[in-house]
Each structure stands twice: as C-alpha cells, then as structure tokens.
Amino acid sequence: MRNIKLIRVINDYTQIKVQMKTGISQSILSKYENGEIMPTTENLILLAKFYHTSLDFLMDLTDVKEPYPPKK
C-alpha cells in the first residue's frame, strides 16, 4: 500500500493524526502502510474521504490523486 503512506507523508500527517481524524488505529495504519494486511472496504472509504482521493489511488491502481466526481 505504497500510496496510503505516500499521501500521508505528502500531507505531512503522522499516523497518530490520521488515527485521531479517522478513528483507524495507528497500529492498523502501520500495517496497511507496510503491506502486512489489506485495508477493509470501510477503512478505505474513510481514508479516501479524509485525503480527498479515490480508492483506486489508495490501492495503488492509479497515480492520479484526484477523487472521482461525486455521485449525482
């Protein structure tokens, strides 16, 4: 999960700050960033909303950080 760590570092956030804003524990975030476990769908959605990006970016499927347009 290279992009999960990348976007956190780009935004100059610590794992603790992300934990405080999303409710995802720091130890789980660390495991996501190190590729030890895969994020749950629920946590991916939380992270995508927090970082204003797409699930595809977080899952390393694209290098485009911009989110998709909202559903009408």
Image (spheres, rainbow, N blue to C red):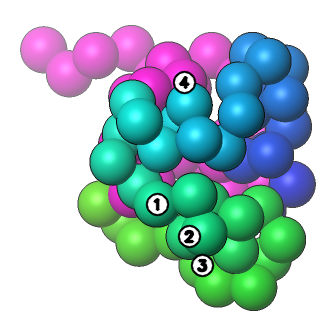
Asked which secondary structure carries label 1, the reply is loop
- In the rendered structure, which disc, 3 or 2, sits on the residue that comes first in sequence? 2
Question: Could you give the CA–CA distance between mark 1 and mark 4, rounded to whole angstroms?
Answer: 16 Å
Residue drawn 59% across the image and 41% down it: 16
Amino acid at circle 3: Met
Residue contact between numbered discs 1 and 2, judged by CB atoms under 8 Å: yes
Residue contact between numbered discs 4 and 2, judged by CB atoms under 8 Å: no
Asked which secondary structure carries label 2, the reply is helix
Camera-nearest residue between 54 and 50: 50
Q: Is residue 28 left or right of residue 72?
A: right
Residue drawn 85% across the image and 37% down it: 6
Question: Could you give the CA–CA distance between mark 3 and mark 2, rounded to whole angstroms?
Answer: 10 Å
Residue mark closest to the camera, 3 vs 2: 2
Q: 50 above or below 48?
A: above
Asked which secondary structure carries label 4, the reply is helix
Q: Which residue is mark 1?
A: 25
Q: Which residue is mark 4?
A: 51
Magenta stretch bounds: 43-72
- In the rendered structure, which disc, 4 or 2, sits on the residue that comes first in sequence? 2
Amino acid at circle 1: Ser
User: At which x and y percent is residue 47?
Assistant: 47, 41
